[in-house]
Image (tube, helix red, strand yellow):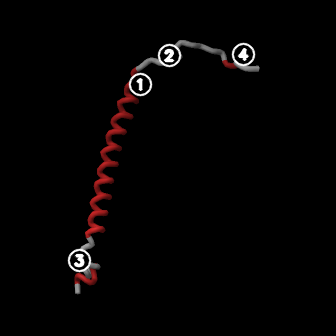
Amino acid sequence: MAKALLGYVGGTDPRLLAEMRRLQQRVQDLESELVRIQSENDALNAAAAHSESPFDGLDIDVPTAEPALT
């Protein structure tokens, strides 16, 4: 009776188990890729914070600057 209530009437379907394993592996792959991308992003942000901008020291007066194209 308990098996019928839980849906195990004919036993577990091997296709369902294979799909479940495939989906679990996909979730693990995506989680590891997310961790890798987050660490890469953190490294890039740290490098950007420590590097000097090539535009530091340029003082352009915007209201008097001439347009590039007329």
Where is mark 3, residue-wise?
11
Tell me the SS state at disc 3: loop
User: Going from the N terminus, do you reach mark 2 or mark 1 first?
Assistant: 1
Q: Amino acid at mark 2?
A: Pro
User: Going from the N terminus, do you reach mark 4 or mark 3 first?
Assistant: 3
Between the residue at mark 4 and the residue at mark 3, the CA separation in whole angstroms equals 78 Å
Q: Position of residue 54 (x, y in %)?
A: 50, 16
Between the residue at mark 2 and the residue at mark 1, the CA separation in whole angstroms equals 13 Å
Within-10-Å neighbours for mark 2: few <14, some 14–19, many 20+: few
- Mark number for residue 66? 4
Marks 3 and 2: in contact by CB < 8 Å? no
Within-10-Å neighbours for mark 3: few <14, some 14–19, many 20+: few
* Camera-nearest residue between 43 and 21: 21
- Mark number for residue 54? 2
Q: Amino acid at mark 1?
A: Ala
Quadrant for residue 69, please give it: top right
Q: Residue at x 30, y 45 (%)?
A: 32
User: Going from the N terminus, do you reach mark 1 or mark 3 first?
Assistant: 3
User: Going from the N terminus, do you reach mark 2 or mark 3 first?
Assistant: 3
Q: How many marks?
A: 4
Q: Relative to 68, is 37 above or below?
A: below
Q: Amino acid at mark 3?
A: Gly
Q: Position of residue 43 (x, y in %)?
A: 35, 30
Where is mark 1, residue-wise?
49
Q: Nearer the viewer, mark 1 or mark 3?
A: 3
Quadrant containing the C terminus is top right
Q: Amino acid at mark 4?
A: Glu
